[in-house]
Amino acid sequence: MSLRTLSCCAALLACLAGGAAAAHAQSQESVVGGGERLTAGGDINASYLGYGKRWIGGAGASVDANVNWRLGLEGEANFTFYRQQANTHATTYLVGPRYQFNALGSRYHYRPYVKFLVGDGAFNFPYNYAHGNYFLMAPGAGLDYRVNYRWRIRLVDFEYQYWPQFTFGATSNYAITTGIRYNIF
């Protein structure tokens, strides 16, 4: 083997070794994706109804679909039925964007977020005199806690629900939710 061939082989090996080191230095997100995931969960909630000025409790379900680790789409259904008076209750079906901030806390277990949901609010008036469906907007914020890769706890979720076309004029409800989430994939 000539000196020229040997030096070319050494240069080629050096380039390959340098390329392998650079490939090994990629971040995990670029290797496995940008944090896409689908999460489903169950909740319990307390809602303050502007009509009747009372707190009632309930349960709900939600699905979060993240396109990356910051931006996602949230859909939720909440049913309020506990401690209702004269059969007055509300059910909401909402969907909209959610934005997560950088994680907080030790080893990034806490994840704060904001959201803006829109959808349908079904309201049952006292003594079943009437039932109406209304458009509503619900900006909100919350904090999730990551237990492990599969499980998350929704520590708190707060929504301000604005019902602009309510029968007796625009009204506002408030909802506070807590629950658990399972990361499907």
Image (spheres, grey):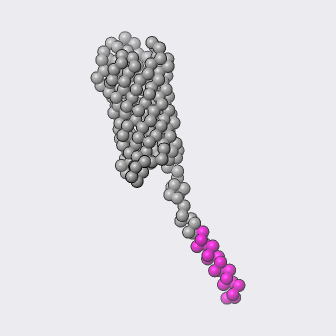
Which residue sits furthest front? 105
Q: Is residue 65 left or right of residue 41?
A: right
Q: Left or right of 38: which side holds 2?
A: right
Residue 11 visible (yes or no): yes
Image point (37%, 33%), residue name: 177
Quarter containing the N terminus: bottom right
Location of residue 31 in the rendering, given as x and y in whole percent from the top left corner? 53, 57
Depth order, front residue of 94/102? 102
Above or below 48: residue 126? above
Does residue 31 appear to the left or right of 51 in the view shown?
right
Which of the 4 image quadrants contains residue 145?
top left
Question: Residue 76 or 169: which is nearer the viewer?
Answer: 169
Kindly tell me whether residue 181 is visible in this rendering: no
On screen, 116 above or below 26?
above
Verify whether residue 9 appears in magenta. yes
How many dots with numbers? 0
Position in image of residue 110 (x %, y %)? 40, 46
In the image, the segment drawn in magenta is 1-19
163 vs 42: above or below: above
Among all residues in the image, which is located at the extreme top?
129
Does the segment drawn in magenta span residue 107?
A: no
Main secondary structure of the magenta stretch: helix
Please give the name of the residue rendered at 36% of the width and 40% of the height, measured from the top-left corner. 155
Residue 29 placement (x, y as % from top left): 51, 54
User: Residue at image x 30%, y 17%?
Assistant: 85
Residue 38 image offset from top left, x and y in percent? 45, 44
Residue beneath the point at 45% across and 48% down:
103
Q: Nearer the viewer, residue 9 or 153?
A: 153
Splitting the image into 4 quarters, where does residue 6 fall?
bottom right
